Image (cartoon, rainbow, N blue to C red):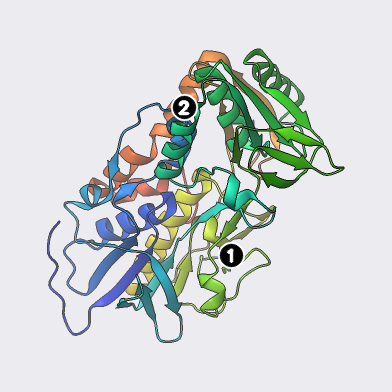
Amino acid sequence: MTTQRETATTHHVLVLGAGYAGMAAAIQLAARTKGREDVRVTLVNPQERFTERLRLHMSATGQQVAELDIPELLEGTDARFVRGWVTAVDADAKTVRVDDDRVLSYDTLVYGLGSVADVATVPGVEDHAYTLDSAQDAELLADRLARLGRGTVVIGGGGLTGVESAAEIAEQHPDLDVVLLSRQEPGAAMGPRPRAYLQAALERLGVKVRSGVEVVKVLPGSVELAGGESVAADAVLWTSGTRVSPLAAAAGLTVDERGRVVTDATLRSVSHPDVYAVGDAAAIRQGYGVMHGTCQGGMPTGVHAAVSIVRALDGRRPRPFRFGYYHTPVSLGRNDAVVQFTHPDDSPRRVYLTGRLAARYKETVTASPWPTYGRMKKMPASGAFWPRGGRFTRIRGAR
């Protein structure tokens, strides 16, 4: 990593969180300001390893995935990496406390601390269930599954993470009974045919799906459903719902009912214009409503925030952020998948893919972030284009 010389007028940009969105913001900023003595970019994250959330269901079954190094990716830029946990943000003083013993100041903040599994809403989840928030979490579950041999694995939540995890566990551990519990049927947001394909694939893998049920308590050897029924469980994986860090609200930033930073059209905090919010940590309103947290939408927010900051530094007005969804790819084991193509508001189109072709498509999507970061270092303008199924589409406003 190169060393940047600071001046009395150096503008400090602090990026919190090296998830998909935070990394995109840091790389774009570093690439677009490389060599400038009036700008310093610092990225803060609790670990040096980049968490590929899109592959955590694979890690949870003991499959080896690449260990991606954050400082390595920043090499060749003027960005600085600080390893540590963000423990407080003072939006008025423009400072961030790291590990309780270090204080970093900023002129502009990019808040991208993301989300984690909601383990607080249902009693017993925090004490007795596994989650997929990090590579370490996935490795803990993989170790448990490997030691089980036979038994029952209950997955709470039938969203995309729950479905992919259920399919992966059933395929990699055929001697285990996998039970998927969900309020809605898996693939509920898909069209009828891709939804039917997804459900048939789960059935083929031996996953027992129970929709229309609600888990109200997790116990050491079972889960309790609304109505009093108990389901035996040797291991529980919790994928139902997410929550964001309370740091934004504690800092006095305007947040929504879920604690996400409310932004204006350019991704600035509506209460603190020197703070940009990206990814899962932000409540970003588009014409179709508030965006939901995905890698698909997260990386473009990071790119746009970086471009907006550079424009503001150069005395230009940031442009509004515009984003439309394109697809919902869901893996169903290593050689099967379903891809639902969507309208910009994320409602299903009639077009979809299934089988091995869909699996290859899903792998292309999953593998795309890391080379995209590398490409942005060499060609910053490429960040305005997002890979979609082998082609690149411009992110409106990111120029």
Residue at the (33%, 40%) spot, across then down: 370
Label 1 sits on a secondary structure element that is loop
Distance (Cα) linking label 2 and label 1: 38 Å
Residue at the (30%, 54%) spot, across then down: 27
Q: Which mark is residue 260?
A: 1
Give 92 or 301, whichever is nearer the viewer. Answer: 92
Query: Which amino acid, mark 2?
Result: Arg
Q: Which mark is residue 147?
A: 2
Residue that sits furthest to the front in the current view = 220
Residue at the (61%, 66%) spot, across then down: 259
User: In this rendering, is residue 143 above or below 322?
Assistant: above
Residue at the (67%, 39%) spot, across then down: 157
Query: Which amino acid, mark 1?
Result: Arg
Q: Which callout, 2 or 1, points at the residue further toward the start of the chain?
A: 2
> Which quadrant holds residue 372?
top left
User: In this rendering, is residue 46 above or below 237?
Assistant: below
Give 238 or 290, whichever is nearer the viewer. Answer: 238
User: In this rendering, is residue 311 above or below 49?
Assistant: below
Q: Where's residue 99, x and y in %? A: 34, 70
Drawn side of residue 142 relative to residue 12, left or right: right
**Residue 172 in view of the camera:** yes
**Residue 269 in view of the camera:** no
Q: Which mark is residue 322?
A: none
> Which quadrant holds residue 338?
top right
Label 2 sits on a secondary structure element that is helix
Q: Where's residue 73, x and y in %? A: 24, 47
